[in-house]
Image (tube, rainbow, N blue to C red):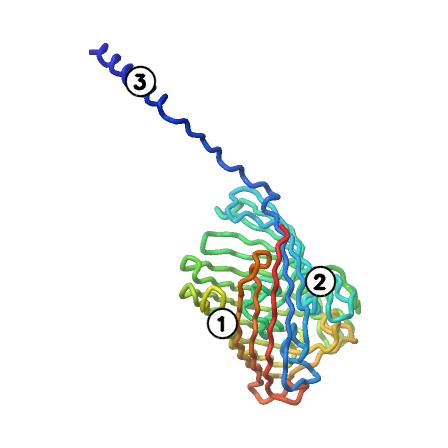
Amino acid sequence: MKKIIISAAMAFATVTAANAADMPLKAVKAPPPMPSWWDTLTITGHVEVGGSLNGNDPAGGNFGQLFTDKSNSFFLNQALLTVQRPLDPKATGYDFGFKFQAMYGSDARYTHFLGEFDQSISDRNQFDIVEAHALFHLPWLTSGGVDVKVGQYVTLEGAEVIYAPDNALYTHSYIFNFGIPFKHTGILTTTHVNPMLDIYLGVDTGVNTTFGNHLDCFNCGDNNRAAAFHGGFGLNLLDGKLTVSATTHIGPENPNVTPVVLAGVDPNSALRYLNDVTVIWKPTDKLTLTTDMNYIRDDGFNATGYGVAQYATYAINDWLKITGRGEIWRDNNGFFVASFPGNLDFVRIEHGNPLGIAISGGPTTYGALTVGLAIKPPVPKQIEGLVIRPEIRYDASLNNTTPFGGGTKSSQWTFASDLIIPFTIK
């Protein structure tokens, strides 16, 4: 019996070998090489130009709007370049990257880090470093690990951002202009607790600041000598169709200058609270609903502001979207909402420089309605992503004040449009 089994096995091996000899040889493909660190480095950018029309042609410009503040004017809003190597979102071990983003244009008047090119150009178009930070992924604490930013970065807060292509509309909300910070210098951690929950914790030098301060310093990097806290949490629900970001920034923000001190305000201890909750829901593939809720308080001057903005964006087809935004924002004390007629007035006010001019709208409840389109016509691949965003906007005081029309009107209509031309170098 044993001999029969051995003979059968030998016969099967012989037949198998013969059949294999008759089969054509197939090349075995080697797995693709793992991408190197440098393969994920990108160099991209865009140019944004736009214009704004106001039939009243007020001497005070388009009150309530910072980045489109000049009525009946043309803007080079942003000529922006980004060099970055982002973290690998699937990294399970240590990973590191960086981001450097610089901008030239009229938007830079309002986005400066103090003490960093903020008064080097007095023209409308200025230079600004938007972000410059190192990134680290640390496989610590949770299965998702911890991401760390060290350097200069944009705020966690708000539904709108400095980077123009990521906004649904050309003009900005009152919340973006007056209710949240723009940028920070410090350390910010993101702990990925699980796929649904992220926790943000950070410490920085304050709102739009860098380092260094002394009394009555009008060109220092910080406008006081105190640090601030920045943090909150993010929720990712319904397989990404519903996200919630609840964030806060708490720290002294008033400038360390003699008039502030004589007013009985300690610029290094009087806290300013900037709180924001942004909810984004995508009920369908075509419809996106965004709610932005905001509350801000300054203890030093006992001033408060608060409001809500609601957005609805609908994709009509592949090349056309329509967005509506309705907003109500209350400036209880006339402390936060203002216009800044000179190109350096905004940063001068941040520094506490007496040469800075800010024109307040007084205690006012602002209402604004905006409807705009995002049009992406067929273009060559080199500028894929080009978008034209025309809009019509109505701003009004809801409590009978007259902040518009150079302080003579309770409302204003503006018509605006921009063109964003993207490019990729690597």
Instruction: Check disc 2 and report its element: helix, strand or loop.
Output: strand
Image quarter for residue 259?
Answer: bottom right
Label number found at residue 148 = none
Residue type at mark 2: give it: Asp
Residue 221 screen position, x and y as percent: 75, 62
N-term-proximal mark, 1 vs 3: 3
Residue 60 screen position, x and y as percent: 69, 82
Image height check: is 50 above or below 16?
below
Residue type at mark 3: give it: Ala
Mark 1, residue position: 322
* Mark 3 vs mark 2: in front: 3
Alpha carbon separation for disc pair 1 and 3? 70 Å
Residue 367 screen position, x and y as percent: 55, 81
Instruction: Check disc 1 and report its element: helix, strand or loop.
Output: strand
Instruction: For residue 333, say whether it is visible.
Output: yes
Alpha carbon separation for disc pair 1 and 2? 31 Å
Mark 2, residue position: 128
Image height check: is 346 above or below 195?
below
